[in-house]
Every structure is written in structure tokens, then in C-alpha cells.
Image: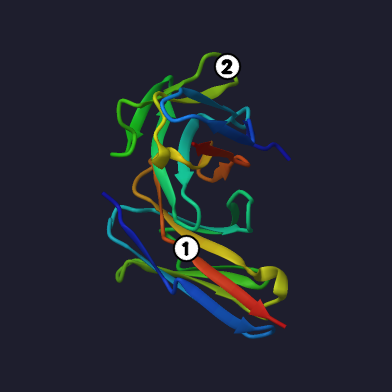
Amino acid sequence: GENVEQHPSTLSVQEGDSAVIKCTYSDSASNYFPWYKQELGKRPQLIIDIRSNVGEKKDQRIAVTLNKTAKHFSLHITETQPEDSAVYFCAARGNSWGKFQFGAGTQVVVTP
Amino acid sequence: EPEVTQTPSHQVTQMGQEVILRCVPISNHLYFYWYRQILGQKVEFLVSFYNNEISEKSEIFDDQFSVERPDGSNFTLKIRSTKLEDSAMYFCASSSAEKLFFGSGTQLSVL
């Protein structure tokens, strides 16, 4: 089955700097890659996603890139702000309507 | 904006007891899931449900667990004879075309 690896496990950045989180997946049939933000004690919230037929997607300060050949995808947060502090999870779906397999999460801390 | 709702938000139970966690998925969604998250760890897949039957389940989802859609709106997870290691946050999620949306979770504590 699908296996998703996520790095780093923790990431500390200065406010205004960029943050990059990387994930790799194992199943070449995976076709949909969402990213979730989870604040302490709350539900994971979808922040951006990308389909396998797209290489990059951007939404304001966040962007996601996908390299299908290498089977990895990354989340980029620019101009980080303290409210970006949270745990971020990547996920991959192995086939249409199938289960979403999650990475282990990255604790992002943005220091003023 | 429609949301997945879960009840209760917290459930405390004694080891060996049965619990039922309840979820109301987003109304036009067809795919339903249960995930769990042990404190500080990753979100783990338990089971997916479509067309009134289980479509996929993980190794965690053994005979202790069952799911049901008793009516047109509710989706439940039953855990029989709870164990200490069942203590976790349980998230229900639903999906229509693609995107997965989570409920606010039920924090289960087994004493």
C-alpha cells in the first residue's frame, strides 16, 4: 500500500522567512496530494491540494510543487507569520475515492 | 459552509466498555472515513465506507471495531471492549468528488 514520508518533523523559522516541507510517496498510482494544517486541539484543515497532472499550484503565500517522476511533493510557505505556527500534514490518495495516507506531520514554529 | 459534525467531543470510558462515536458527514458526500490520532502522532486511517459497506480498512480496524450508517445522515464507529491503547482522538471525515473534510473529533479516554 501507499507509504508517505514527511520531513522535517520540526521546523523553526523567523517571521518573514520561508518554510519548506517535503513529502515522498511510494505508490506511483497516487493522483491527489492535499496538505492539511492542524492547530493544537483542532481538526486538520485542508489548505491546498494538487492533482497528479499539475506540477505546481499557488494560493497567496502557500504553494505546492509535485515531481511525479521522483514521487515527491513539497509545501512552500513564504513570508511566514506567527499564525502559520501549526502542525502540517501531507497526504496522498492511492486511487480515486480511496483512503488518504498521511505523513507523520511537521511542527512549524514561527518566531517573531 | 457545511461541516462534518461529531459527538461527543469527549468520551471517558472504563476499559472493557463499549463506546459509540457519532458523525454526521456533509450532506452530499458519498465517502466516509474514520481516522484516529494518538496525541502528538500522525493521522492514522481506520476505515472507509461507501454505498453502505466498508470499502477499505486498516490492520488497526479489527473485530473490535465496527461502522454503521443507521440512517441517511449518521455514520457511527463502535468500539467493543475498549482497551487503554484505544485512547486517542477519533476523526470522522467525508468526501465527495475529491477533497477530504474532517470533523472536529472525539477525544476518547479509556481508563
Q: Position of residue B98 (x, y in %)?
A: 50, 44
| Residue at mark 2: chain | B
Q: Is residue A81 above or below residue B49?
A: below
Mark 1 is on which residue type? Gly
Mark 2 closeness class: few <14, some 14–19, many ≥20 residues within 10 Å? few
Residue B72 has which mark? 2
The Cα atoms of the two marked residues, 2 and 1, are separated by 34 Å
Q: Position of residue B1 (x, y in %)?
A: 73, 40
Q: Nearer the viewer, mark 2 or mark 1?
A: 1
Q: Which residue is rendered at x = 63% and y = 52% of the image?
A: A41
Q: Quadrant for residue A71, please give it.
A: bottom left
The residue under label 1 is A105
| Residue at mark 1: chain | A
Mark 1 closeness class: few <14, some 14–19, many ≥20 residues within 10 Å? many
Q: Which residue is rendered at x = 70% and y = 36% of the image?
A: B2
- Say whether mark 1 and mark 2 are on the same chain: no
SS of the residue under disc 1: loop
